[in-house]
Image (cartoon, helix red, strand yellow):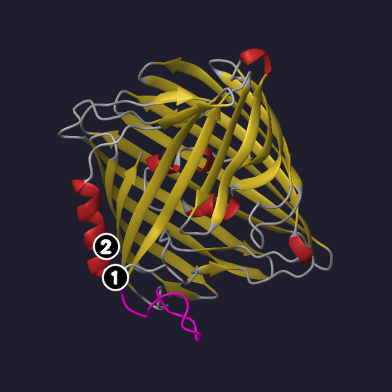
């Protein structure tokens, strides 16, 4: 679904005119379960300053980009029902009407009523990647880091067990394909451990280590990445299809430091692909980013991920500025997938309890098969959530 400029403007005006809504609208008490409703709507705009490739090139059948230097699109339209109870059970059913796919659809059993000691079955985000596990509505930048989008295993059907205390936690899972048909496949397992030697209000130091290992679908796998622009149709780094693959094993390390209104966060991934007819292939990627809440708010910490506060002054809102550097190297032996280094500068405005406005500028430096391609992209996002 594509949005014209006029449609996007109308959607924004309607959102701004709407009354403020509270998070988790409680619907009813049904069968001993307190049912609530959440939603997230995001509209994005990208303006491309191309270098070599046309980042918004459409395909020959008319799908994909529009061939212009700008793109406007409804990014997400998420609708989520949540239930607390009965007994020690929690459940969630989420659906993205824009992408036409299921989100979290699972049941969690809190052992002894303790939410930090649980068993979970269904579709959920797998235990890897600090950025992937963090809330989508509170992303620090419009596009997740290239490394996160490329290596993190997101939602899959499976089962998991997790246990945590105030300053440490561990989660293990076994998973299969994504619930929505024709999306991600490949059965495997994952493990993530976290440790926060400092966990105080406004003062947090976090470390994490994760490992995922999964089978490839039809022995075929491909590693590639967009240039930190979700609406781009081209990839500047790309290995092409490997047709002799067995399994993918990815190890990631993560760190985060929060001190008052400042947050520093980074991750590094090393991914190995086992191949039948060629040497195994290894690629790497990572990012480091900093964020400053100009208006003074700080972050919380729960379940091994940061939590973003509401504005201290709702009428003026919470302002953030951030800077991120991320890098990927897809060259290994005879495979020349390319290298890409990206800088992203951004400003975010959380207005009242339900609105967020984001503006990013992305500068890319990439090289693949001796061809350099260094575009720039300006990005904007309008968001409404409840």
Asked if residue 298 is positioned above or below residue 56 in the image, the reply reads above
Residue interval drawn in magenta: 56-70
| 312 relative to 156 in the view: left or right | left
Q: Where residue 4 is drawn, which disc sits there?
A: 1
- Is residue 264 part of the magenta span, yes or no? no
Residue located at (62% from left, 14% from top): 113
The image quarter containing residue 240 is bottom right
Q: Which residue shows up at 41% across the image and 32% down it?
A: 24
Image quadrant of residue 313?
A: top left
Q: Position of residue 340 (x, y in %)?
A: 48, 61
> Could you tell me what secondary structure mostly forms the magenta stretch?
loop
Quarter in which the C terminus is drawn = top left
Circles 2 and 1: CB atoms closer than 8 Å: yes
Task: Point out the image quarter for the N terminus.
Answer: bottom left
Q: Residues within 10 Å of mark 1 (few under 14, many from 20)?
A: few
Q: Secondary structure at mark 1?
A: loop
Q: Residue 39 occupies which quadrant of the picture? A: top left
How many labels sit on residues?
A: 2
Q: Position of residue 236 (x, y in %)?
A: 49, 69
Residue 8 circle label: 2
Residue 225 marker: none
Give the SS element for disc 2. Answer: helix
| Left or right position of 66 against 187 | left
The answer to whether residue 253 is visible is: yes
Q: Residue at x 22, y 60 (%)?
A: 10
């Amino acid at each position: 679904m594509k949005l014209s400029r006029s449609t996007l403007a109308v959607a924004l005006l309607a959102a701004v005119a709407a009354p403020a809504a509270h998070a988790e609208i409680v619907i009813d008490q049904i069968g001993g379960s307190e049912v609530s409703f959440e939603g997230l709507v995001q509209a994005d705009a990208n303006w491309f300053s191309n270098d070599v490739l046309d980042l918004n090139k459409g395909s020959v059948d008319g799908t994909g980009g529009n061939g212009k230097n700008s793109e406007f699109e409804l990014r997400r339209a998420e609708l989520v029902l949540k239930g607390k109870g009965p007994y020690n059970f929690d459940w969630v059913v989420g659906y993205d009407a824009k992408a036409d796919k299921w989100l979290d659809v699972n049941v969690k059993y809190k052992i002894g009523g303790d939410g930090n000691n649980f068993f979970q079955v269904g579709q959920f985000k797998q235990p890897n990647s600090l950025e992937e596990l963090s809330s989508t509505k509170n992303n620090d930048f419009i596009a997740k880091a290239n490394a996160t989008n490329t290596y993190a295993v997101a939602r899959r059907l499976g089962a998991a067990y997790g246990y945590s205390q105030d300053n440490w936690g561990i989660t293990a899972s076994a998973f299969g394909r994504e619930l929505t048909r024709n999306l991600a496949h490949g059965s495997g397992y994952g493990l993530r451990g976290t440790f926060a030697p400092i966990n105080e209000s406004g003062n947090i130091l976090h470390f994490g280590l994760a490992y995922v290992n999964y089978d490839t679908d039809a022995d075929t796998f491909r590693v590639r990445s967009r240039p930190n622009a979700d609406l781009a149709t081209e990839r500047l780094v790309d290995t092409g299809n490997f047709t002799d693959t067995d399994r993918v094993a990815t190890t990631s390390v993560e760190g985060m430091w929060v001190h008052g209104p400042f947050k520093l966060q980074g991750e590094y991934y090393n991914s190995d692909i086992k191949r039948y007819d060629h040497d195994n292939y290894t690629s790497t990627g990572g990012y480091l980013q900093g964020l400053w809440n100009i208006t003074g708010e700080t972050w919380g910490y729960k379940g091994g991920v940061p939590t973003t506060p509401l504005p201290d002054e709702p009428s003026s809102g919470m302002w953030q500025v951030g800077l991120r550097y991320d890098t990927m190297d897809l060259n290994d032996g005879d495979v020349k997938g390319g290298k890409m280094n990206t800088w992203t500068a951004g400003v975010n405005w959380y207005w009242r309890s339900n609105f967020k406005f984001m503006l990013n500028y992305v500068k890319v430096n990439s090289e693949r098969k001796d061809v350099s391609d260094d575009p720039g992209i300006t990005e904007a996002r309008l968001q409404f959530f409840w």
